[in-house]
Amino acid sequence: MDRLSFEKLIAIDEHLSEEERMIRDEVRRFVRERYLPRAGELFAKEQFPTDLIPAIGELGLLGGSIQGFGCAGMNQVMYGLAMQELEYGDSGLRSFASVQGSLVMWPISKFGSEEQKERFLPRMATGELIGCFGLTEPDAGSDPGSMQTRARRDGDHYVLNGTKMWITNSPLAQVALVWAKVDDGGAESIRGFLVERGMPGFETPTVHGKMSLRASSTGEIVCSDVRVPSANMLPGVQGLRGPLSCLTTARFGIACGALGAARACLDSAIDYSCERLMFGKPIAGKQLIQKQLADMATDIATGMLTWLHFARMKDKHGQITPVQVSLCKRNNCKVALEAARVSRSILGGNGILLEYPAIRHMLNLESVYTYEGTNEVHELILGNALTGHNAF
């Protein structure tokens, strides 16, 4: 009997334009030809494939949804599908593009000066210039308002002091968007600063020993009396609205991206179960295995179609609410993590080998489940919206 592909099951191509399908298929080829053959080795060695950065830029995936400045100008559906294909390869690969585009390039395009846009965005779109986003601190994760990083005005410069933690891309970055508290005339506010590699006192030590997102370059940002020109401060936003709006933008890409990891696990589980013989027949013919596969496919399809609905809304109206983004991010990360765990189980002992994708995705998704708003934070955002009672 012929096997039905996941895309035919949910008839997703019926809802996509020719250009949307073309971008998805192009990124899919890139990931399967140039990343997947190395995926296990990169994970094992804690290496990010920097040699692929120019190709990722050529595909238009860095700042893909931004208009102008050498960016691809994709709609939300195109961008989300591209992120899903990257995460089919590895969450670290998608995280690289997501941080570069949504957390650094997007705020520059939204809140930056024209000089900042012209100076940074074209080179970031090609991957010549890599960026990172400095918000999380060792003692300020889900409560960014309690950050300790400070910026003090000194003539036409600001002097930054503080430490940021769990920063994707920081060891590779030439520019870091660092959020800090500023005391300007007695009124404390949060502002974003473009801190450039080579500024004295700016360091980005690598975090070692991770058992998740090992193929992602992760580090700290340490600012010790870093003098940053006033011209490097984002002029268009102040307060927590700045970094939180960046996170909302990035979370929506994650909501689709995580389903790429889930699909990789589903594909692997189907392939393995059709080949693995037990008691004289493939385990794919066992009722328990079929139920597990059916549940995985149903949950992934539900998450995908929910995301597509909101992506179309965002393209039509220009935005969706942060609560709607939380709904997608929470559900789809949960679906992906469960799919990875079930896939690992179906593969039995082989499921812990890097020869197969399940264990790698399972470990990666533990981080995706947590970062850019923990699962619990998104539950409270939804609970607040549904009841009108703030439980934070």
Image (tube, rainbow, N blue to C red):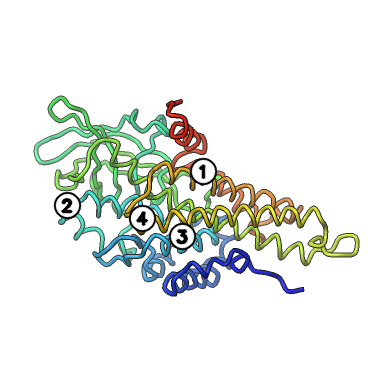
Image quadrant of residue 157? top left
Residue that carries the numbered disc 2 in the rendered image = 113
Q: Is residue 22 left or right of residue 146?
A: right
Name the mark on residue 100: 4
Q: Nearer the viewer, mark 2 or mark 4?
A: 2
Residue that carries the numbered disc 3 in the rendered image = 83
Residue in front for this viewpoint, 242 or 300? 300
Q: Nearer the viewer, mark 1 or mark 2?
A: 1
Mark 1 crowd level (few <14, some 14–19, many ≥20, 10 Å Cα): many
Name the mark on residue 348: none
Q: Position of residue 170 (x, y in %)?
A: 37, 49
Sequence order check, earlier mark of 4 and 1 = 4
Sequence order check, earlier mark of 1 and 2 = 2
Sequence order check, earlier mark of 1 and 3 = 3
Q: For mark 1, give the secondary structure.
A: helix
Residue furthest right as drawn: 279
Q: Position of residue 344 (x, y in %)?
A: 70, 52
Residue in front for this viewpoint, 163 or 100? 100
